[in-house]
Image (spheres, rainbow, N blue to C red):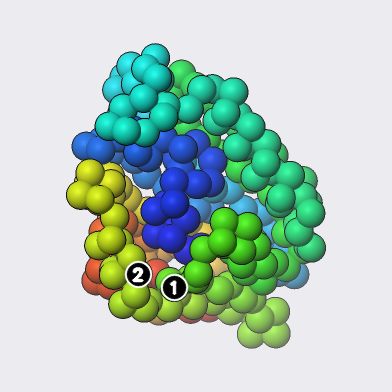
Amino acid sequence: MNLLKMMSRFRFVLLLICLPLLFSSCFEIIEEISLRADGSGEMTITVNLSQSKTKVASIMLMDSVNGYKVPSRQTIQQEMNDAVARLRKMPGISNVKSTTDFNNYIATISFSFRDVSNINNISRNILEAQKIKATNISTYSYNKATASFSRDYRYYATAKAEFNKLKKEDREIFRTATYTSIYRFPAVVSRSSNALAKISKSRKAVMQTCSVMDLVNGKVSVSNQILLSK
């Protein structure tokens, strides 16, 4: 998904509402995909601000900070509900659920997909709904015949240019932010093309963690071609 574009507009669930409040705080985005042999599966997106929960809780008591209006819990929950409603209308997507933990400031959205390529439609629909022009974006695919999973991530220098247009305070949001992708499979992984990705001991999962700033600056890629044993 086009993380920089969506985050720079302070959208999408709890993270995108609270980002302007966390100029020097840590947060992480975790994207999990559990794939079945037929290409269907589940996806969970988690936004975790728990490392900054004390600061977030204090700010939530204020009306505004640094020129930004502080959202109420009701506003945050409504954004979550809107995201769930959009997902439920998308082809191939079902069983959409969300959770919002206001004690630890962790938000999740999970759903089932008929085919992993349905995730690509989510990216496009979210970007169009926010009137955001796509730059960096991922596409997912699964070839049942060859038992191969692919994530194609394309970096464009315009992403960095858009990032540099943000105010200094807003750019600071991303300095310590991390992004983690976790893919789980029904069979043993025989090969993973991304050298930065780690294969689990069971060899049925692949994980990669990187800083958001490295993604913005094009220093790291999350593209991967993963071949499963038949």
Can you see residue 200?
no
Q: Which mark is residue 20?
A: none
* Residue at which label 2 appears: 159
Asked if residue 129 lies left or right of residue 29, the reply is right
Instruction: Say which residue appears at 57% left-offset and 56% top-offset.
Output: 130
* Residue at which label 1 appears: 135
Helix or strand or loop: what does disc 2 sit on? helix
Place of residue 203 in the rendered image (x, y in percent of width and height, measured from the top left): 47, 63
Instruction: Say which residue appears at 67% left-offset and 67% top-offset.
Output: 121
- Placement of the C terminus among the 4 image quadrants: bottom right
| Label whose residue precedes the other's in the sequence (1 or 2) | 1
In-front residue for pair 150/206: 150
In-front residue for pair 100/172: 172
Asked if residue 163 lies left or right of residue 47, the reply is left
Place of residue 103 in the rendered image (x, y in percent of width and height, measured from the top left): 46, 18
Amino acid type assigned to the residue bearing label 2 in the image: Ala
Q: Is 24 drawn above or below residue 129 in the view shown?
A: above
Amino acid type assigned to the residue bearing label 1 in the image: Thr
CB contact under 8 Å: marks 1 and 2 = yes
